[in-house]
Amino acid sequence: MARDMRLNMKWFSKGNIQKQLLSIYIIAGLVPIGIIGTILLVSTFSMFTGYNRNLLESYGQRVSTTLFEITTQAYNISEKFAYSQSMWNTLSCEYTSFDQEKDTIDEIDIIDSYNYEYTAIESVEIYSDNPYIQDYRQFYEATDTIKDSKWYQKAISRKAAFWEGLPRQDENGTTYYNICLIRQIPLVDSKYHAVLVMRLSDNYLRTRLREQQYSVVISVNEGSVSFCSDNSYYGQILTDLLPVDYGKEHYTYQGTKSINGRMSMLNVNTLSAYRADSILYITTIDYNSISRFFIILVFIIIILLLALIVPYEILRLFSRYFSDRVVTLKSAVHKVSSGEYDIVPSLEGEDEISEAFSDLVITAHEIKQKNEQMYKAQLDRKELLNRQSQMELKMLTSQINPHFLYNTLETIRMKAVTAGDREVAKAIKILGKMLRFVLDKGNSDEVSLASSLDHVENYLSIQKMRFGDKVGYEIHIDDDIDPESVTTMPLIIQPLVENAIQHGLREKEGNGIIRVDITKVMLDSTEEDSKSALKITVTDNGEGMSAERLSELKESIKTPSDDGSSIGISNVYNRIKLKYKDPYTMTIDSTKGVGTVINLYVPIQIRHN
């Protein structure tokens, strides 16, 4: 696995830096964003269509419920007409004059009462084959055309009511459609027939079923469209708009279809009419959802393209700038390595590369000076020249190596940042800080408590990257201690923390904690007054030690062995004893299975600026 990774990284390292950065971006940026974008589009489409399909289906169910209420109440009113004794008498009577007919009809209360009871009924028409009845109010003569119509024949051949879509024409000859309840009025002991036609009001239906976002189309049985909320499909056959299986009693359909040049979502559900042998097909249409989704789709695509193109252009410009500077640095290094020390004095930019270039310029200048001095000395004495040359090279190496190592770490960190590996970049940065602390402060007599704790925290951060949850830490300082002004010996806390990790938490499965506490205490002294001290406590919840092992450790730190098992804390113990004397010291307490506590007691030293 590791070998395959090395081979893959080796493939990335082919070509110049600019090509490497762009190649990594294509694989680490374009491909994931493309995959995520595709998943986003698919999931958005699925979620959007599902959501709108559910809304459309819910609206269809609401229309069905409303329509069931309207048709049920219409049927109940028709019962009053069909089984009214006065209605039977009026339709069975053989009138001697038209005036007699009008007087009889005017006396029927039910004729006008339906308008007050239910506004959903647009009109009531009663057709009779009684030749003594002439057209008056709601009563009409059943002409031959009426008698030959399918709905009339169906009505007089059966007792049950049924629904059907019927056309009608106004005075201007314009054709309208209504959803009509049709039923026979059973004339007991009469030779005549009568048929009741109750038309539902289109305006009332539009008011009850109005929804700005959706359109409603209703047809009865296999008939043509009898109601349409936007007047677009009156008289059309429903199968011309969408597939319908009339053989199913409870037919449902959901899908998309181009209607009037617009891709729309459709939902079809059926309603079995109350106590009538009829099925109403309710079609709800959403004209806008698909178009809205395509707008959202275009918006998402634009965002994805911007997310791909803008970073690519920025990275391309940066990689070109970065590559040019690296090429300049490479050329200068090549000149210096070839013995040509006259290079350009500076490099554009204020970052690690420019700092490395500045160090290279200084190094080249110093080497040039050293070479000149060596050349002059060679004229005087060859043996002395050789000795001086070796000394100067050692001096130069001691000057170059720390700077070179630190700057190299910074250059590697920048490459990691550029490659997007923030964790590696963070680790290198922390390691560089630790190196800088050791180089700058390691040989000092005193350093600030703040810089020592910063070094400890950097060390703990590195260990947490290595071990994860196995190593946790906390650092606490009393409020009355100013870590910037208080000073201590360098490198007396970090060895204790390192010992806690290596010997305390090494075998622990997880949830290891190292705690560093800084407090002020008073120590007993041989003098009359007690001495104030800085107490530095390092605590871990690791494996701990038995009483025998603790006793051995306390003795061994006084005379450290060469095996290195306790050299860190032994070094700290002896440095404190040598520098500060009594009563300042170090104590160790440990309990097997609980953890270890190390206390340092050092004098409180205040740095005055």
Image: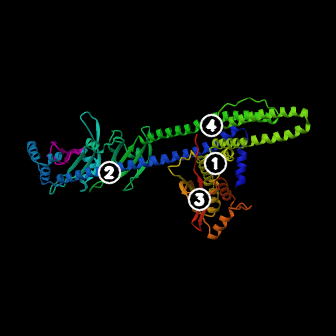
Picture layout, residue 495 above or below residue 314: below
Neighbor class of circle 3 (other Cα within 10 Å; few <14, some 14-19, many 20+) is few
Numbered-mark total: 4
Report helix, strand or loop for mark 2.
Answer: helix
For label 4, the residue is 315
- As drawn, the label of residue 64 is 2
In the foreground, 37 or 376: 376
The nearer-to-camera label among 2 and 1 is 1
Calculate the distance from the C-alpha at mark 2 to the C-alpha at mark 1: 66 Å
Marked residue nearer the N-terminal end (4 or 1):
4
Residue 331 visible to the viewer: no
Q: Are marks 3 and 2 in contact (CB under 8 Å)?
A: no
Give the mark toward the camera: 1 or 3.
Answer: 3
Q: What distance separates the C-alpha of mark 3 from that of mark 2? A: 100 Å
Circle 2: residue type? Ser
Question: What x and y, as percent, mark residue 590?
Answer: 59, 65
What span is colored magenta in the figure?
Answer: 117-144
Write the residue at 70% across / 33% down. 324
Q: Residue at x 82, y 39 (%)?
A: 392
SS class of the residue under badge 4? Answer: helix
In depth, the one of 382 and 342 nearer the eye is 382
Which residue position holds label 3? 526
Taking 126 as reference, is 534 left or right?
right
At mark 3, the secondary structure is loop
Q: Nearer the viewer, residue 297 or 262?
A: 297
